[in-house]
Image (spheres, rainbow, N blue to C red):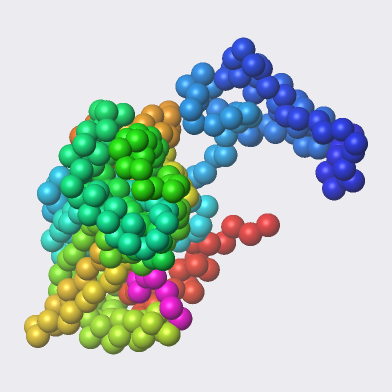
Amino acid sequence: MSTRGSAATNSRVPVPRDRQNDYTPQAAEERRTFARERTGVELEHVGSFSFDPGALTGNIEQFIGVAQVPIGLAGPLLVNGESAQGEFYVPLATAEGTLVASYNRGMRLLYESGGVTTTIMADHMQRAPAFLFASAREARAFADWLDEHFAEIKTAAEETTRSGRLVEIEKYTASRILYTRFNYTTGDAAGQNLTGKATQAACRWIETHNDTIEHYFLESNFATDKKSSQINMLRTRGKRVVAEAVIPNEILGRVMRSDTRLMYRARQVSNLGGFMSGVNNNGAHSANGITAMFIATGQDAANVAESSAAYVYTELRDNGDYYYSVTIPSLIVATYGGGTGLATQRECLELLGCYGRDNVRKFAEIVAATVLCGELSLGSAIVAEEWVEAHDLYGRNRP
């Protein structure tokens, strides 16, 4: 009998688990049976998957199956990067009609314009402890103490990790509190767990060697994990990537049925609209491409909250060419660890030549280049008054 929407019973009925080995086909089937008995819903498609549940340890708990998201392929994307060079076919996982077609059109435009140039400007992942003192003066003195003992703190932090490196400690005072940001490079991992463990070791060393601290909290919300923030847009969290291109007016007219001067005027209007509304992104829809790539390649999808923040800057050149750039200041990606090793996600990273170690900068550049293509495509569609028609044509799947 279904229990959906029914009143709470006196006894809680937990989801079944196998405490010996919870990552087996049998354990997953037992939970699907439990769900069917409790709700009356058959999980036929949720229960259809092609990999061994034993590979999911560390990725999910109480596994029952998969959410199948359609994956489209856009490209070729031409990238002139420092790590990503050449043509790439980009997997995009989405249920939004027009999205893949739009990014594909932007890739064609920039391919014919000579490609997208990408540059990684900075690379930092943070954990942000806060230290409390008897007064503001002790907090100020502690800031100097951290500088004096940075080498020892760095050693304590890096003893917990093979790939993480503590590069600096930022310091901000308020009241009798010193807020800090421990900045790391994290290799091919996204690094949130890495930095947490390393910073905990560093804080324990600090507490042992400084008796003025009343208390500390390992995370003060000053790293703004899973939330966009002004400090991370200015100071970087993850990779800070610039994607830029120059589009001749003739190519924009032929491919997009638009005009660089009208595009630039629309950009001015859009900047003002963004300023009036208080957005953290003066672009069009960077979250679309980033989310679709994150789902396809096994990234932490919640990081889209930070990673989709962007600065768009454009110039209308004297000869009619249109310079367009997107700066993504907080792009958090990985090519090793987390969900990147799961079966379908690994295949999508392999499509890009980005699976495994020493590929994270290449992947970050491909993501940024893809974002630029989507910005130009949507911007052109709005200017050419093709936006609604495109959704009518490609987005017809309605219940």
* Residue at the outermost left position: 319
* Residue 313 image point, x, y percent: 24, 74
Residue 356 visible: no
Q: Which corner quadrant holds the C terminus? A: bottom right
* Residue at the outermost top position: 20
Q: Which corner quadrant holds the N terminus? A: top right
Look at 24% across and 48% down and name the residue there.
Answer: 146
Look at 68% across and 31% down and name the residue there.
Answer: 44
Between 291 and 168, the one nearer to me in the picture:
168
Question: Magenta stretch?
Answer: 277-285
* Residue 176 image point, x, y percent: 41, 61
* Residue 25 image point, x, y percent: 61, 18
* Residue 293 image point, x, y percent: 38, 48
Residue 153 vs 100, above or below: the answer is above
Between 265 and 184, the one nearer to me in the picture:
184
Per the picture, the main secondary structure of the magenta-coloured stretch is loop
Residue 90 vs 165, above or below: the answer is below
Residue 338 vs 322, above or below: the answer is above
Say left or right for 368 vs 40: left
Tally the numbered discs: 0
Say left or right for 72 vs 69: left
Please check the rendered image and state whether residue 279 is part of the magenta-colored stretch, yes or no. yes
Look at 57% across and 39% down and name the residue there.
Answer: 67
